[in-house]
């Protein structure tokens, strides 16, 4: 059966309409496949057949601008072809000629209509996509207080339009690349011509074209298939559901990847510092943006190192703690039967079990579950002398620090890093924590994103926009990031200050 399907896909159309119609009916398993529609019509004695998938194509467009246009069309010559129909009969702006059977099938599956003509070896592909799509709405994971509120949706065309609204420039280039060897889907490489480095564009384009998977389910799969190091705990591409943030990346010389059915975008190359930036930083005054960014950086270090430091100090380096604090810790743990390591692992597991359950259950009871888990279970554990009160404070502060990270994927990577630091602190104390920190730093120094260093422009040092760790005044940010093409037209001639 697969051999028969492959042979039917090969080659080009015949000039006989009935033969072409039989071929496409066999490919779409008609009439078993009830979504496949074959509509016959006439144009001044010429037989035509419109092929489309119900639900993917807009029936009103087909009826009004294709079938009725052909039925009420003008008198035509004795011999017509696809180009003649496009120029004189059809009332849909986006049309193209195609004679390859496989390309026609892919277009029909994507929601287009193929119009076959008796006596012509070419078909007209009509842009009639009209499947239901979610309206542009607020973002779910990247909420902001100040700034734009709209986010990407599952429609690729809508997402491309959103980007063009933020960057209304003829230099904004969108390249459509088909990914998936068996079940194909569309991905779009977006960049700003003259700003993005040609090496970045070529690398991103090459990786997308080299994807050899039979099917690619959205941007999550694309990210895993094109990233530099699949074993890394930190993401090497930044995923965002905000068009304003994606537009900001384009203006800095990065490329953005969009995919059909994915309500987000991938930006690359990225650095560690991109993961700590939030969209509303640039909408706030520079003092506020800098303060909030420092809070996030502190939250990142607290999330990774606080539990490990606690277990190292209480187990190995008690002499470094004030006597009053050490007495409080000892008194709180006097009735707890478990060692500190077991306590921390129990609390970490419980914290993220409650978090995951609150995410998966229906929204109406998600907040109630969080309250029950945090208050009732925590209080019961303390009353039963299973967990010490100070450890609940440690784990709560750690969780808050992790939630301060704007990027969801990066936050999950930090959780795994924290477990590594906890194990190191439990084995070797502060020496283990320092060794774990060194290992994490060396790992980050070795990471790359589309071939660019993950810690640049700090390590290795590069010239860069002052919007890095601190968000300095807007008039100092006249040049793009170091990722941008040298001599770009976005580079300012001089810095302007009020």
Image: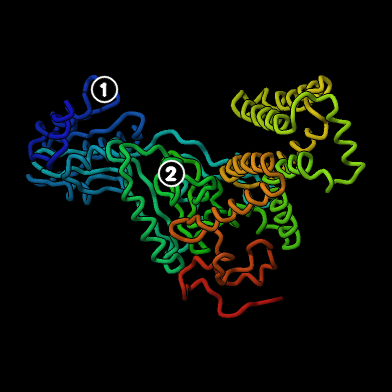
Q: Residue 171's x, y, as percent?
A: 42, 65
- What is the residue that sits farthest to the right in this orientation? 324
Residue 227: image tag: none
The quadrant where residue 213 appears = top left
Label 1, label 2: how many angstroms apart (C-alpha)?
Answer: 34 Å
Q: Which residue is rendered at x = 66% and y = 24% of the image?
A: 364
Q: Classify mark 1: helix, strand or loop.
A: loop
Q: Dividing the image into 4 quarters, which one contains the N terminus?
A: top left
Above or below, 415 relative to 160: above
Q: Nearer the viewer, residue 170 or 368?
A: 368
Mark 1 or mark 2: which comes first in sequence? Answer: 1
Q: Residue 271's x, y, as percent?
A: 55, 57
The quadrant where residue 378 appears = top right
Left/right placement of residue 217 relative to residue 444 reads left
Picture mark count: 2
Q: Residue 433's x, y, as percent?
A: 68, 48
Residue 33: image tag: 1
The crowd level at tag 1 (other Cα within 10 Å; few <14, some 14-19, many 20+) is: few
- In the picture of the structure, the residue carrying the numbered disc 2 is 224
Q: Residue 343's x, y, as percent?
A: 73, 30
Above or below, 370 relative to 164: above
Q: Nearer the viewer, residue 115 or 312?
A: 312
The quadrant where residue 363 appears = top right
Q: Is residue 38 visible?
A: yes
Q: Dividing the image into 4 quarters, which one contains the C terminus?
A: bottom right
Q: Nearer the viewer, residue 455 or 208?
A: 455
Q: Which residue is rendered at x = 75% and y = 62% of the image?
A: 287
Q: Which residue is rendered at x = 64% and y = 39% of the image?
A: 423
């Amino acid at each position: 059966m697969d051999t028969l399907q492959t042979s039917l896909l090969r080659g080009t159309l015949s000039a006989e309409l009935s033969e072409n119609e039989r071929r496409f009916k066999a490919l779409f398993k008609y009439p078993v496949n009830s979504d496949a529609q074959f509509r016959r019509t006439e144009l001044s004695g010429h037989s035509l057949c419109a092929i489309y998938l119900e639900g993917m194509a807009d029936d009103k467009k087909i009826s009004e601008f294709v079938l009725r246009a052909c039925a009420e069309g003008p008198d035509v010559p004795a011999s017509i072809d696809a180009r003649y129909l496009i120029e004189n009969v059809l009332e849909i702006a986006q049309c193209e000629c195609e004679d390859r059977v496989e390309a026609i099938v892919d277009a029909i599956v994507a929601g287009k209509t193929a119009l076959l003509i008796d006596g012509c070896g070419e078909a007209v592909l009509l842009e009639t996509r009209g499947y239901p799509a979610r309206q542009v709405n607020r973002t779910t994971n990247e909420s902001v207080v100040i700034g734009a509120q709209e986010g990407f949706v599952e429609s690729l065309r809508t997402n491309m339009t959103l980007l063009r609204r933020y960057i209304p420039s003829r230099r904004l280039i969108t390249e459509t690349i088909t990914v998936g060897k068996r079940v194909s889907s569309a991905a779009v490489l977006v960049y700003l011509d003259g700003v993005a480095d040609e090496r970045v564009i070529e690398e991103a384009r090459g990786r997308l074209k080299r994807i050899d998977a039979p099917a690619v389910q959205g941007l999550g799969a694309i990210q895993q298939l094109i990233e530099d190091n699949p074993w890394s705990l930190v993401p090497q591409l930044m995923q965002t559901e905000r068009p304003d943030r994606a537009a900001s990346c384009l203006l800095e010389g990065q490329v953005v990847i969009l995919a059909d059915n994915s309500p987000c975008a991938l930006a690359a190359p990225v650095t560690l510092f991109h993961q700590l930036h939030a969209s509303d930083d640039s909408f706030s005054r520079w003092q506020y943006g800098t303060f909030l960014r420092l809070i996030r950086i502190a939250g990142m270090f607290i999330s990774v190192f606080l539990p490990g430091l606690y277990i190292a100090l209480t187990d190995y380096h008690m002499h470094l703690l004030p006597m009053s604090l050490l007495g409080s810790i000892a008194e709180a743990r006097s009735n707890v039967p478990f060692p500190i390591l077991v306590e921390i692992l129990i609390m970490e597991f419980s914290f993220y079990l409650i978090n995951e359950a609150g995410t998966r259950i229906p929204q109406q009871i998600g907040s109630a579950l969080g309250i029950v888990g945090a208050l009732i279970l925590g209080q019961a554990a303390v009353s039963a002398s299973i967990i010490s009160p100070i450890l609940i404070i440690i784990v709560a502060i750690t969780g808050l620090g992790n939630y301060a990270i704007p990027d969801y994927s990066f936050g999950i990577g930090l959780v795994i890093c924290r477990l590594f630091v906890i194990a190191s602190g439990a084995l070797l104390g502060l020496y283990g924590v320092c060794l774990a920190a060194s290992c994490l730093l060396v790992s980050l120094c070795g990471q790359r994103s589309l071939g660019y260093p993950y810690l640049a422009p700090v390590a290795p040092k590069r010239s860069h926009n002052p919007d890095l760790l601190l968000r300095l005044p807007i008039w100092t940010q006249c040049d793009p990031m170091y990722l941008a093409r040298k001599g770009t037209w976005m580079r300012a001639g001089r810095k302007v200050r009020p």
